[in-house]
Image (spheres, grey):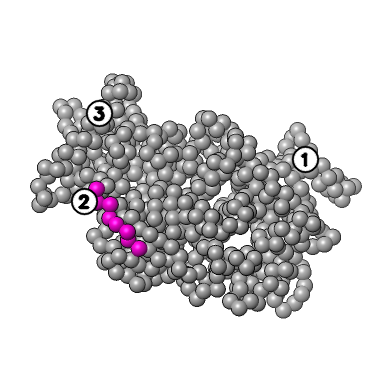
Amino acid sequence: MSKSLKTLSDDLWKNRVEKVNSELFTLTYGSLVAQLCRDLNYNYAEVNAHLEKMGYNIGLRLVEEFFAQTNLGRCQTFRETAEVVAKVGFRMFLNVVPQVVGVDEKQFSLVLDENPLAEFVELPDDGKAFKELWYSNVLVGVLKGALEMVQLEVNAFFVSDVLRGDDTTELKVKLVQVLKDEIPVGED
Amino acid sequence: MSSSRLLVSGVGYDPAVGPQSTGPQVQQLATSTSSLKRQFSASGGAHSSIFDKNLHRAKHDISLSSLCYLFGEIVSWCDSKSRGVQQLESRLNNLGYSIGIKYLELTSLRENFASGNISSSSKSHATKREVRILEILQFINSSVWKGLFGKMADKLEKSQDLANQYMITDNLPLISKYISVPKEFQHLNCAAFVAGIVEGILDSAYFQANVSAHSFPEPGLPLKTVFVINFDDKVIKRESMRFER
Amino acid sequence: MQIYTLYILNKSGGLVYHNDFQPGLLQLTTNESLVMASTIHSIHAISSKITPANAKTNDLYNNNKSGLRIIETENFQIYVYQTITGVKFIGFANDTNLAEMEVWFKKVYLCYSDYVMKNPFQQLDMPIKNDNFDRIVRQTV
């Protein structure tokens, strides 16, 4: 399974995905976060929530391209979902493959060794940001939104971030429920 | 609304001072666009700092889609906070501006590293700085566009009517490739964001200007965009004093 | 392959997009189009219920495993393609077959994911008014 996912995503990346230097993306995301911090008076809880909301909106949209490009079907298990998210999803959109750790039928963690969102970023040195701001929180929203579109209600959150001085950047995803009634008819 | 612009208005490249902030407001900015000097002295904390990393890093590509989704959300967010097209464009412009003022420093540093003008051991500042309007515009038209969008801009022209006006044309601005502006948003061009980047670069290079993005759709080029650059009179005056003798 | 018309239906069966590709087609009223869309949506759902559990699908890309896929008339056919997320693309066509149509649907789905989903002015599940998308879809026919 995972071998073929790698082949699939390699092929997608090489032949299908239109690529762009990540620098503009990194700078754009940075200017967004900085502006949000100013707009929301450095209330980082609100900044986190806002980033998640924006990510959620992205997730709802991005999932269509994911399926249009990959031709993948519905995952049979949550383990499989974890693999697909890391090996195909992250690869296809951010060109990185996070490690999947701590995976079972109810949860998994993604460990990001590379994070294009946070390249050359340093958190504000105001004594608060290091404890309160989850700089890459947009990713939490993207996962929630995209998985909701395949009827997986999840709870997702960062548990560590190298920007805060942690050793790793880890994003945890927990399955809340499968929204069975909302699976489109004929697609099961 | 204009607060973010106010914040950065003091920052610029003053040839008399060097790459430093020039205004009193800069203290409030310390967290986002502080001067290199301050940043270096702030490094060396407990965790490894970004300043320990090599500025000249391997190029990492990502999917254009990711940039488009992110930019799309930014447009929606700016729209939700704006009344009218003008405010929306000026918000986008401001966000781009905050990128532009950093980007010039970054690209020129990189280019100089690459060409060996600066080495970590010597303190030589053989950095080449563009001092003529046409040179800085060509630099934007080629190097900046390539760095940001992976292609050169399509045309660079001087206005025939106005001495202080120049135009850069992009037939297909990458960032608005998939955006379709509804009729009620007449004349909106989301590349106002890119105009902001250009404006930031010009301001930080001490070529104060206003830059705006305008749609000029043509058959086959429905998203053709012209970036109109209006330099401050003092920039034109300086140029003529220096070079037109 | 002759493709006359494309409908796009949102998850709830609402008609959000309608584009005619051939000149001189007889037209339905807006109301009739809406009825057509929601009727196909309903029949699709109902027919899916009576699909035997062990029925084999010989699908290429279509995720529409058990629902309605083709309606035939003497002179044209209506093809139904459903994505995993529940969006339906409906093609009115002639001189073609399911496999060929699915390749086309696949292209349309890609255009949709680019030009509709990446347009910040597009509200989800709402009618699609988008010149870029119109143009790009037309190029696939």
Against B44, residue B21 (above or below) is above
In this view of the protein, can residue C104 be seen by the observer?
no
Residue at the (20%, 45%) spot, across then down: A186
* Dot 3: chain letter: C
Quadrant of the image containing the C terminus of chain C:
top left
* Disc 2 to disc 1: CB gap under 8 Å: no
Q: Residue at x 45, y 33 (%)?
A: C131
Residue at image mark 2: A188
Dividing the picture into quarters, in which one does residue B85 lie? top right
Report, in whole angstroms, how far the alpha carbon at label 3 lies from the one at label 1: 59 Å
Asked if residue B128 lies left or right of residue B193, the reply is right
Q: Quadrant of residue A95?
A: bottom left
- Type of residue at label 1? Asn
Label of residue B164 in the image? 1
Kind of element beneath mark 1: loop
Q: Amino acid at mark 2?
A: Asp
Determine whether, in the image, residue C99 is placed left or right of residue C107. Answer: left
Image position of B116 with respect to A174: above or below: below
Q: Amino acid at mark 3?
A: Met
Q: Residue at x 29, y 28 (%)?
A: C34
Relative to A142, say whether B209 is above or below: above
Residue at image mark 3:
C36
**Closer to the camera in the image, A57 or A112:** A57
For label 3, the SS is helix
